[in-house]
Amino acid sequence: LHNAIYDAWAAYDEKAKGTRLGFGLRRPRAEWTAANKRQAVSHAAIVALSEVLPACQADFAQQLTSLGYSPTDTSTAAMVGQTAGRAVVDYRRSDGANQPGGYADTTGYQPRNTWDKVNDPWRWQPLCVPLPPPGATSCPGTIQQPLTPHWKLVTPFSPNALPTVQIPAPRKTMADTVDDIIRESAGLTDRKKMIAEYWADGPGSELPPGHWNLFAQWVSRRYRHSLDQDARLFFALNGAMLDVSITAWKVKYGYDFVRPVTGVRYWKAGKTITAWRGPYLGIGPLQGETWQPYQRPGVVTPGFPEYYSGHSSFSAAGAAVLKDFRGAAEFNASVTLKAGSSVIEPRTATHPGTPAADVTLRWATFEDACREAGASRKYGGIHWTDGDYYATDIGKKLGEGAYARAKQLWEGG
């Protein structure tokens, strides 16, 4: 979407080079009007969106009409946008994302473990969701399938950035690692619970890349961005999001590392630990094999390996792009989460719910938001410390690389 928008916008800029057609769409200076730019990027957007979400084409056409344009428009600006959009769509049709059978695996990946048996405690285990009682012999819910193991094959935005990032191996000293995550669980406060929930970005939400697009929208409104600024900002930001997703999934299925829910239950089986015991049950003693992360019952933990954290790398990349684009680290944003608004421990007729009082999360800088997003995954029992720490470092480098690549293009290089 934002690649198509950028390429259409570039036709009306003095320096900018398109990603697919170079300077081939550049229009005469007399046509460099705000009206032409708006019309071109709107038509580019509908081409890209209709390709990705064909069932929603009527909705997109209605939105286009509401902006004062026609889906059948053949004016110069409209054709510039449509040409730019089609060029991007045609290029991306064979970029490795559209696997036969949709998201079916073509890489041969097979989990070492099954939902009911841990054959290798260092490897990812697909779960039965919701979690059944220990010792269950049948899954009453849904068994996780490994999500998008082929994603490492997708063509990146910054082709030179990914090979230069060094990925260390996760630690294999589980005693301290497991104890760390148990301490996080035992230390859950209302504030930490709400941090875990605010940043969860699970199924049915905008997901982590979308979260940083929401932040970018807020920045755009706050600083009254022009179309020129937003065409560049969202182009760089989403190029970074793509590169992070490819790198993270390459690493995830390369190391195939165990998630905390499996690690804690395996290494603490038969032992009494102190941790969060479940919705409304507070912190207290429980058997290690019954431990659960602070997540919704229908989520538990994502359907792919742990190392490293996608949330942390997406957030670090987003923070890097926004910082570089603004030329400053200041964010100064906040969100207030109302008392009893938890989706895991909501207010009921018999329970005040979580949090007991309103909780306000504040981020003075983009990096503050990034660090909190990473910490949220440890509070929620989704990631180990290594998965957050290394992902933050790698995401920052990928974000800086994507921004440099985007800037090179809009400066004509």
Image: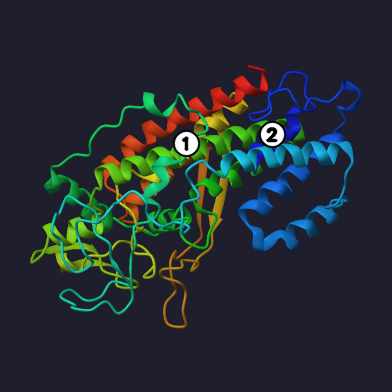
Quarter occupied by residue 344? bottom left
Query: In this orientation, which residue lies closer to the viewer: 104 or 183?
Result: 104
Query: In this orientation, which residue lies closer to the viewer: 153 or 117?
Result: 153
Residue farthest toward the right in the current orientation of the protein:
30
In this image, 166 relative to 32: left or right? left
Upstream in sequence: badge 1 or badge 2: 2
Is residue 141 depicted above or below 97 in this figure? below
Percent coordinates x, y for residue 371 in the rendering: 41, 39
Percent coordinates x, y for residue 15 in the rendering: 73, 18
Residue shown at the point (48%, 41%) measured from the top left: 369
Percent coordinates x, y for residue 232 in the rendering: 66, 31
Residue type indicated by callout 1: Asp
Q: Which quadrant is the N terminus positioned in?
A: top right
Residue shown at the point (20%, 51%) measured from the top left: 123
Is residue 253 depicted above or below 37 in this figure? below
State the SS at label 1: helix
Residue farthest toward the left in the current orientation of the protein:
270
Indicate which disc residue 27 carries: none
Residue type indicated by callout 2: Tyr
Is residue 90 depicted above or below 335 in this figure? above
Structural crowding at the residue carrying mark 2, measured as other residues with C-alpha within 10 Å and reported as few (<14), some (14–19) or many (≥20): many
Indicate which disc residue 6 carries: 2
Quarter occupied by residue 284? bottom left
Q: CA distance from mark 1 to mark 2?
A: 17 Å
Percent coordinates x, y for residue 257 in the rendering: 24, 48
Residue shown at the point (55%, 22%) measured from the top left: 404
Residue bearing mark 1: 243
In this image, 65 relative to 298: left or right? right
How many numbered dots are placed on residues in this image? 2
Quarter occupied by residue 28? top right
State the SS at label 2: helix
Residue 225 appears in the figure: no
